[in-house]
Every structure is written in C-alpha cells, then in structure tokens.
Image: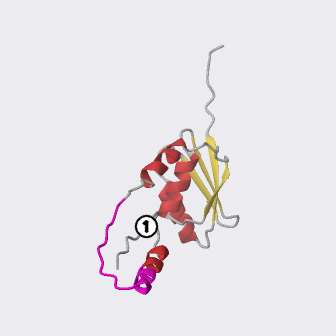
Amino acid sequence: MGNKEQIVEEEIVLKIYMHCEGCVSKVINCLTGFEGIEEVKADMKSNRVVVKGQKADPLKVLERVKKKYSTNVELISPKPKIVPNDHKVQELPKKQEIIIEVVSLKMNIHCEGCANDIKKSIEKMKGKLLFSFNLQF
C-alpha cells in the first residue's frame, strides 16, 4: 500500500449581507484569484459565503472582503485564535514619549489680582505638571 496523503480543503464561512445578484457577483469577484482560494460559493438567501482552499487564511480573506466589499462582514468559521499582540505593547511607549519643556515667562505683573488671573489660566491648561511664580512687585 502506498503512502497517499489526503488533501483536505479548509472551508471558510463568512456572513455577508447581499441583497441582490450584483452584490453576490461583487463578493465572488473580489475573492476569486485571491491567494489560497480555490472555490467561492455565495448564497444570497442565507447571506453566507463559503470559501474553499488549502492555503486560504481566514483573517486575510475577511480583511479582503472588508476592504473590497463591505465592513459589515463576520467570520463564522473557523473562529480566529486569539493571540496576544506583543508588538502593540511595544508600540505604546513609542507613542507616549514624554517631552519635558521648561517655559520661562517674564511678565510685568503690577498687582496680585493679575497674578491670580494668570495662575488660573495656567491651571486650566492640559499637560502642565508644575508651575511656580516669582512675584516681585
């Protein structure tokens, strides 16, 4: 007996709202010829599309349909595996770089009332950490 491997095509089922034959053909056309896809079947009545292919990636197929047809698409099977995104955790510190700036304002403040008005304005500002006055009348 020979060692013959049986090739099993993976089925990807998507839920896509299609109200006419034009929608069906648009979905089929956007998926036909995409990497790993060998067969596309669309059913307008049940709003489901079945994609068959050995090397078809469900998440790539989902993104393709969202990009080319509609963002209202749901992956029914196979359910995507939830993988922690370590690269997103690494991106956060880059976005949240703390920049410290020291600003020195020399102003002619003639009374304590003007100083209080300026102090209230600075307190309302976002991003300020610390401020101080050197009042000399």
Viewport quadrant of the C terminus: bottom left
* Residue 44 screen position, x and y as percent: 65, 66
Position of residue 61 in the picture relative to residue 106 (left or right):
right
Question: What is the total number of numbered labels drawn onto the structure image?
Answer: 1
How is colour applied across the structure in the image? Answer: secondary structure
| Quadrant of res 109 | bottom left
Above-or-below relation of 123 to 101:
below
**Residue sticking out furthest to the right:** 46
Q: Residue at x 61, y 69 (%)?
A: 18
Mark 1 crowdedness (10 Å alpha carbons): few <14, some 14-19, many ≥20: few
Viewport quadrant of the N terminus: top right
* Residue 6 screen position, x and y as percent: 63, 28
Q: In what element is the residue under mark 1?
A: loop
Q: Which amino acid does label 1 sit on?
A: Phe
Q: Which residue is drawn at 39% across and 85% down?
A: 111
Above-or-below relation of 25 to 136:
above
| Quadrant of res 57 | top right
Residue tagged by mark 1? Answer: 131
Mark yes or no: residue 34 visible.
Answer: no
* Residue 53 screen position, x and y as percent: 56, 43
Q: Main secondary structure of the magenta part?
A: loop
**Residue sticking out furthest to the front:** 137
Position of residue 94 in the picture relative to residue 77 (left or right):
left
Q: What stretch is highlighted in magenta?
A: 101-118
90 or 59, which is in the foreground?
Answer: 90
97 or 18, which is in the foreground?
Answer: 97
Position of residue 128 in the picture relative to residue 24 (left or right):
left
* Residue 15 screen position, x and y as percent: 65, 60
Magenta highlight on residue 136: no
Mark yes or no: residue 7 visible.
Answer: yes
